[in-house]
Image: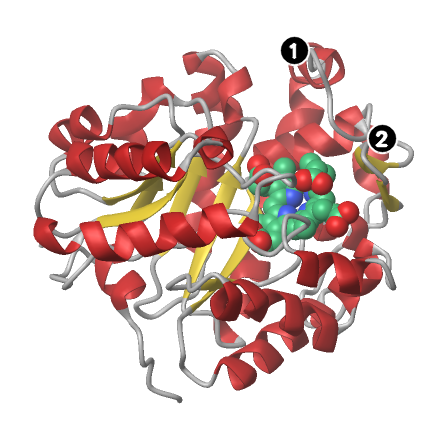
């Protein structure tokens, strides 16, 4: 196995001492980069995901162009529903569409079983190739959606404004909902295990829609399945990160769900979460992504304010509070990353 030349991110996930705070950015491989758009102009999104050479190339772009301390494999959380037999399209400027959404137990029963080494082998191939091309420069993160967030897309058939279909589904057909969540938890655990076996140094679980649930429903429909996924992942020392957006009311539960790191959105106060959970987990985040539209002075002061809110010591990974927006200037992101590298030294 290639030795990592920069292991700051892995050390911070384990709350080991580091000389400065590591930084990577959710959705760092994407449309804000002209180098990404040049490739995307030639291929559709799903073809890029399914072609390991293209996936590896755009995965490495932000490492070389922006200088982040970790790469995240270029793919999507919706490759799992696609592998289960749902037709997926990425509509230009409208987001993902899944055809024939799941609305009852009969639909759930018709979904295909998934062997990640077969239906999702293209992701594993992309991980192997990316690791080879990175040659230990920075760690590689694999990822998946939380069962709840995947089910939301599968029932809504895409993005949603008020989530009425998924809410109708869980309240009117809880047996079907739990059966699908169990299925997704098993597939997701197998998939993340395969991603780690293929060489990923860490994995992140995205629960983008956790925050649309009441605290009680979050426990019933999301948290227990996150716990199931994490407990079933086959891993050695590879850290697991849980990013559950808008779930401010369950920080202690997330700190005890088996993950090594909790990702925080920008509505959270890092100081408060740190003092609440103590040394149960490392923290990742949480600059408001829209700060990247501002002047360098504002980006610097807000970056320092995030570093200060964690304070001194290890166990902080700098990131945005959600994905980078597509119309951000790459220069502003480069400035942010340089600022974290420079200003975080005094916190260690
Ligand atoms: O972080 C990275 O750079 C790795 C790649 C990555 C993508 N999607 C690529 C992508 C990751 C980690 C994801 C995760 C993902 N996908 C999530 C969870 C994270 C989050 O943002 O909450 C969700 C909810 C999805 C589903 C999805 N895929 C949506 C809602 C969209 C459309 C919105 C958008 O940003 O375009 C996608 C498409 C998508 N996934 C793109 C990229 C680079 C844009 C596709 C394009 O080039 O047209």
Residue labelled with disc 1? 171
Quadrant position of residue 163: top right
The one nearer the camera, 182 or 317, is 317
Is residue 286 shown left or right of residue 111? left
Q: Where is residue 122, by image quadrant?
A: bottom right
Label drawn at residue 101: 2
Q: Is residue 34 above or below residue 154?
A: below
Under tag 1, what secondary structure?
Answer: helix
> As displayed, is residue 269 above or below residue 227?
above
Residue depicted at 18% across the width and 32% down the height: 309
78 relative position to 197: left or right: right
Task: Count numbered badges in the picture.
Answer: 2
Query: CA separation, marks 2 and 1?
Result: 17 Å
Which residue extends farthest bottom?
1
Where does the image place residue 59, in percent across and percent down from the top left?
Answer: 59, 66
Give the quarter the ligand 1 occupies. Answer: top right
- Quarter of the image where the N terminus is located: bottom left
| Camera-side residue of 234 and 68 | 68
Q: Give the SS element for disc 2.
A: loop
Q: Tell me if residue 162 comes above or below residue 218 in the rendering.
A: above
Q: Which residue is pictured at 73% across the width and 53% down the height?
A: 79
With 297 as the anchor, is 208 left or right in this view? Answer: right
- Mark 2 touches mark 1? (CB < 8 Å): no
Q: Earlier in the sequence, mark 2 or mark 1?
A: 2
Horizontal and vertical percent for residue 187? 62, 53
State how the image is colored: secondary structure
Residue at 78 percent across and 72 percent down: it is 51
Q: Is mark 1 within 8 Å of ligand 1?
A: no
- Determine if residue 260 is in view: no
Of residues 114 and 338, the one drawn nearer to the viewer in this rendering? 338
Label 2 or label 1, whichever lies nearer to me, is 2
Q: How far across and how far down the image is residue 222, in percent?
A: 50, 29
């Amino acid at each position: 196995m290639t030795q990592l030349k920069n292991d700051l991110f892995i050390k911070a996930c384990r709350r080991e001492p580091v000389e400065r705070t590591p930084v990577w950015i959710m959705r760092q491989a994407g449309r804000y980069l002209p180098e990404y758009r040049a490739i995307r102009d030639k291929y559709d999104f799903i073809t890029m995901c399914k072609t390991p050479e293209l996936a590896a190339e755009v995965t490495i772009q932000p490492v070389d162009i922006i200088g982040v301390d970790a790469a995240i494999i270029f793919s999507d959380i919706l490759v799992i529903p696609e592998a289960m037999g749902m037709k997926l399209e990425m509509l230009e400027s409208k987001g993902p569409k899944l055809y024939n959404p799941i609305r009852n137990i009969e639909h759930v029963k018709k979904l295909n079983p998934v062997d990640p080494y077969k239906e999702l082998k293209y992701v594993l191939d992309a991980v192997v190739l990316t690791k080879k091309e990175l040659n230990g420069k920075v760690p590689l993160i694999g990822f998946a959606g939380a069962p709840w967030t995947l089910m939301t897309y599968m029932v809504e058939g895409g993005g949603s404004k008020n989530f009425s279909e998924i809410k109708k589904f869980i309240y009117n057909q809880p047996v079907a909902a739990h059966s699908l969540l169990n299925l997704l938890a098993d597939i997701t655990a197998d998939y993340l295990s395969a991603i780690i076996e293929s060489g990923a140094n860490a994995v992140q679980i995205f629960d983008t829609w956790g925050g649309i649930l009441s605290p009680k429903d979050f426990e019933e429909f999301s948290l227990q399945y996150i716990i199931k996924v994490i407990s079933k992942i086959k891993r050695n020392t590879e850290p697991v990160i849980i990013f559950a957006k808008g779930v401010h009311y369950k920080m202690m539960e997330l700190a005890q769900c088996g993950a090594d790191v909790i990702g925080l959105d920008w509505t959270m106060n890092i100081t408060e979460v740190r003092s609440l959970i103590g040394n149960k987990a490392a923290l990742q985040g949480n600059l408001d992504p829209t700060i990247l539209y501002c002047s360098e002075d504002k980006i610097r002061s807000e970056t320092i304010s995030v570093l200060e809110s964690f304070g001194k010591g290890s166990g902080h990974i700098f990131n945005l509070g959600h994905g980078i927006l597509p119309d951000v200037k790459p220069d502003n992101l480069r400035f942010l990353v340089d600022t974290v590298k420079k200003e975080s030294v005094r916190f260690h």
